[in-house]
Amino acid sequence: MLTYLAAALPQFTSPAARLLALQCALRADTRGYVVLADGLLRSMRLRGRQELWLELAQAGWMEATGTQCGSMTVRLLDAAVLGQAPGRSERRRAAHWALHPAPLMLAPATSAALRLTALVLASHSITSAVSTSDLETVCRLCGHSPQQTKELLDRLAAAHILLAWRHHHHTDEMSWQFTRQQPDGSADRDR
């Protein structure tokens, strides 16, 4: 779903809007409607952030269809999101995992940019101690420039979320290691 959003949303889409779009895409029903409870938005630190809804609406990706006591209802306008595999029950599990990506334990006040970067890294992590990916791929999924991504990786290391990270200039690959790991296999079960 992160790959889909990287293609569907404009490059300048903010990290907070990307996190909101991810939850919408993963929680949408078969007609493209999603109801997000205030509690979910509050836990994501996105409640009351009307500019994020406007940002996604201006991108032509969704439209707000109404608010009711304690929830916001939106309709996704991009039909491609409804055809994304796997099915709805698996996407709902993925939506929950995206809020608490194993093996990470992020502080509730962590910025949206750091949460999105950590989520992208966690989604590319395997059970081995060190994970790798192409720097360009991570940048595209986060909607950041290489310089921004490197700064965010430094901030994740300073916050002790990453034990270490490294950019291999000759291959343009990067590698990283999370500080906290869950017991073997638990991250795979959550996905």
Image (cartoon, grey):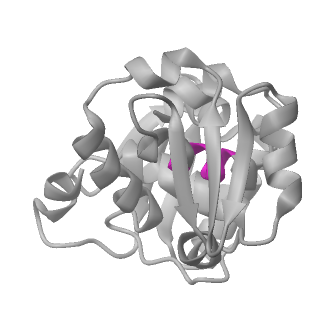
The answer to whether any part of residue 190 appears in the image is yes
Q: Quadrant of residue 146?
A: top right
As for residue 83 lying within the magenta part, the answer is no
Q: Main secondary structure of the magenta part?
A: helix
Q: Residue at x 51, y 77 (%)?
A: 106
Q: Residue at x 46, y 40 (%)?
A: 28
The answer to whether any part of residue 154 appears in the image is no
Q: Nearer the viewer, residue 67 or 151?
A: 67
Position above or below: 45 against 149: below
Q: Quadrant of residue 135?
A: top right
**In-image side of 168 versus 182 (left or right):** right
Q: Residue at x 34, y 76 (%)?
A: 180
Residue 188 drawn at (x, y percent): 17, 52
Residue 27 drawn at (x, y percent): 43, 47
**In-image side of 109 versus 43 (left or right):** right
Q: Nearer the viewer, residue 76 or 19?
A: 76
Q: Residue at x 66, y 76 (%)?
A: 110
Residue 143 drawn at (x, y percent): 72, 36
| Magenta span of residues | 18-23
Position above or below: 45 against 188: below
As for residue 22 lying within the magenta part, the answer is yes
